[in-house]
Image (cartoon, rainbow, N blue to C red):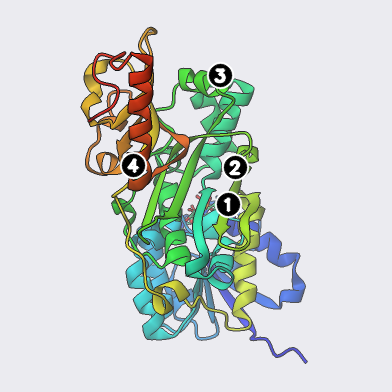
Amino acid sequence: MDTHKQLTIGLFGFGVVGEGLYKVLQQTPSLKANLKKVCIKNPGKKRNAPASLFTTDKDELLNDPEINVIVEVIDDADAAFQIVTTALKNKKDVVSASKKMIAEHLSALLELQEKTGQSLLYESAACASIPVIRNLEEYYDNDLLHSIKAIVNGSTNFILTKMFEEGLDFKQALILAQQLGFAESNPKLDVEGYDAVNKWTILLAHAYGIVEHPDNLVFNGIQNIQLSDALVAKEKHYDIKLVAQAKKLLDGKVAAFVLPQFVKQDDHLFFVKNEYNGVVIESSFADKQFFYGKGAGSFPTASAVLSDISALRYNYRYEYKKLYHHIIPELSNDFYIKTYVSFDDWQFIPKEKFEWIEEWHAEADRKYLVGVLPFSELKNNNWWRENNTSLILAPEPVIEDVEIRRLKKSTNNLAFRQGNFSPFPFSAVKN
Ligand SMILES: NC(=O)c1ccc[n+]([C@@H]2O[C@H](COP(=O)([O-])OP(=O)(O)OC[C@H]3O[C@@H](n4cnc5c(N)ncnc54)[C@H](OP(=O)(O)O)[C@@H]3O)[C@@H](O)[C@H]2O)c1
């Protein structure tokens, strides 16, 4: 006897994800989920589904007592928030793919889940087809999780792959990503890192119990990356990726940010190409684990939505274990970061802010250096993303205080031994 809950679905949105879900549901009769109504915005659009299914009146879904699940896959974060909160208050479980809406309103949504007892699932909002949220929730205990780093934005990864492996220029690669349904309708969200930081906000809550507004995280996108950066990367046998990461520091706090990074060939993320996403989780005993899958697109995203719908049949809800049942670590700005910076003119680079500089190339029109900065410099200032400056992190970017003193000392010694203490326009190592 099937004791699973019978699901009657009201779907908001019939775009890339919504239509994908419609098709996937048709091919999954075993789920026994009945799609009763679809709410869309523009009634005039041609749809690949019976006209009787569609409405533009959201209350037809939200006030229908027979509908017990609202699936929200629209591209308007403000409207999505209204729909999701009303649905929860109306005692409906919700599945959503809207990372922007979830990231920006996570606190309010947590409160509402507590208050209503309803379930809000959003696996597809993080890495589309990769089941990372449920794994972080169910499998990884807070104390064991050393670090998590990931490529969470399929469209920037697609653009970088097409630029650096197939020689497309930025605009061509972006248009191709949009044509294939990998990019958001507003490309700024992807390209400038907003989408990635929204996803990272969500994953931080499930990895460490840290609930932060995305505006409070340090992030950037790929908009400043230049062809010359790619050439430097090639020379060093690196790839450039937009990497989101979080790392437990020695003092128990967490370093978290989303920035472009040089990725070495022996890094799992090196092999994540095109619209794929990848997540590397490092824990005490299991060491490194790597999750890989499509991070965007109609069916891959719909598959995660489907999995959430399926989980609702047995009343699954996120327990937010790290948030409610563990001591929540603080987010830290008190560490150092090793980074490459390329730029057109010295006047835009505050050289004195660097702890030390390891490489310095001032000959060409496009100049660059590799050095170590306090992370707070990125948090508190903007020079590193202005005036055509491109900042790309080194492969193992996080340097903690203890380590920095040791490294500083040995760099000093080396400089003295080689008799070239001041090879640059300023002292190579800050004293
Ligand atoms: N595409 C992906 O690969 C992907 C991956 C993961 C997550 N997501 C997320 O999934 C969501 C949907 O993305 P998408 O790519 O499917 O977007 P999309 O192709 O642009 O489709 C958006 C849909 O939302 C509908 N819509 C907009 N405002 C509405 C409103 N107020 N009420 C009802 N319907 C409304 C639109 O209606 P009309 O058809 O009438 O215009 C359209 O059907 C977004 O939050 C996105 O971030 C997307």
- The quadrant holding residue 115 is bottom left
User: Nearer the N terminus, badge 4 or badge 2?
Assistant: 2
Q: Residues within 10 Å of mark 3 (few under 14, many from 20)?
A: few
| Residue at disc 2, secondary structure | helix
Mark 1 residue element:
strand
Q: Residues within 10 Å of mark 2 (few under 14, many from 20)?
A: many
Residues packed near mark 4 inside 10 Å, few (<14), some (14 to 19) or many (20 plus): many
Amino acid on which the number 1 mark rests in the picture: Val
Examine the rendering and report whether any part of residue 343 can be seen: yes
Which residue lies at the image location 66% right of the left edge and 61% below the top edge? 303
The image position of residue 362, as x and y in percent, is 35, 11
> Label 4 to label 3, Cα distance in Å?
25 Å
Task: Kindly tell me whether mark 3's CB lies below 8 Å from ligand 1.
Answer: no
Give how far across and how far down residue 221 sits, in percent: 41, 38
Using the image, tell me which numbered label, if any, was put on residue 235.
3
Name the residue that disc number 4 marks: 336
User: For the residue labelled by badge 4, is the local secondary structure a helix, a strand or a loop?
Assistant: strand
Q: Residue 280: which disc?
A: 1
Q: CA distance from mark 2 to mark 1?
A: 8 Å
- Amino acid identity at mark 3: Glu
Q: Earlier in the sequence, mark 4 or mark 3?
A: 3
Horizontally, is 46 left or right of 245 in the view? Answer: right
Question: In which quadrant is the C terminus drawn?
Answer: top left
Give the residue number, with chain letter if any, for mark 2: 269
Marks 1 and 4: which is nearer the front? 4
